[in-house]
Image (cartoon, helix red, strand yellow):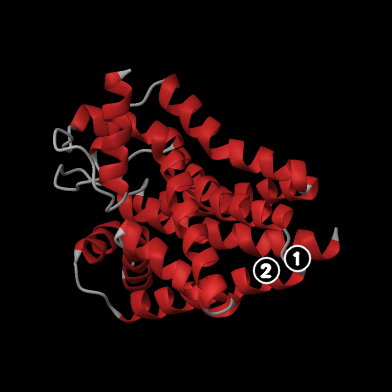
Amino acid sequence: MKKELDIFFTALMFYTRIPCPKNIDHNPDYLNKASRYFPLVGWIVGSVTFGAFCLFNYLIGPEIAVLLSMIASILVTGAFHEDGFADVCDGFGGGWTKEKILLIMKDSAIGAYGAIGVVLLLLLKLMSVNMLLKITGIPTLNLYITYLLVFVTGHSLSRLAAVSIVFTHEYSRDDATSKSKPIAQNYTWREVVGAFFFGLLPLFILSYFQWQLILVLVPLFLMRIYLARYFQKWIDGYTGDCLGATQQVCEVVFYLSAIAIWKFI
């Protein structure tokens, strides 16, 4: 039990800025096993996002509350996944060979592709969540529970989509300098089962309130397949930045899919 807690806190330390016990470090073995808790970390980030939304919705109003809740999620994760998305935009936008793409993604400076990509991504996320809140109607207690599940599900499913690439594809870089490489080395059935359990459970609970939302798995699955194949085509696998980009894109796909389902089904 203590070992599992240490693995969980390793995941929490690696993927967020939330303080963890002092004995937790970036143990490579624990980092490798921490992938089973990646979607569970999404529960925490989604809950923080929802809490910030509720607070600022009460104090100010829904539209600004959504923006401030996005800021809260970025602060909790340290823009970990947004940074990966920006690097992927720069790398695949400016590079035409595997070596060039990987070199650009490793550069800490952000370029035009990355800046434009992140701005458009955040705007799309802001507008999609605002629209999702508008079409659901006047908030009630049950609706606030649904909102909580929507925030948590968006973060857990998108993280499941990202970590599932680890289970099906090879790590692209040959060197060991990347801080993300330990999670790419080995995995067991425990990592697969844990990731899928924590990734899918919030959706199954959400579908109890809105059964149609189970259909979001279709566009998410298709987007995950597309991104994995795209990365495989250009760099023969994936990097940590690719996983971060997958999380961000799939989170937005979840919100957009939920809007379409709520509106037309």
Per the image, label 1 sits on a secondary structure element best described as: loop
What is the x, y in percent for residue 175? 16, 44
Question: Is 66 situated left or right of 139 in this image?
Answer: left
Q: Residue furthest front?
A: 59
Circle 2: residue type: Leu
What is the x, y in percent for residue 194? 47, 28
Tell me the tag on residue 182.
Answer: none
Of residues 187 and 5, the one drawn nearer to the viewer in this rendering: 5
Q: Is residue 183 visible?
A: no
Q: Quadrant of the C terminus?
A: bottom right
> Does 133 sit above or below residue 240?
below
Tell me, yes or no, whether the two marked residues, 2 and 1, touch with CB atoms within 8 Å.
Answer: yes
For the point 41% across and 38% down, which residue is it? Answer: 169
For the point 26% across and 63% down, which residue is it? Answer: 105
Other-residue count near label 2 (Cα within 10 Å), few / some / many at <14 / 14–19 / ≥20: some
> Does 128 sit above or below residue 255?
below
Q: Which residue is mark 1?
A: 136
Q: Which residue is mark 2?
A: 133
Question: Is 198 situated left or right of 262 in this image?
Answer: left
What is the x, y in percent for residue 166? 40, 38
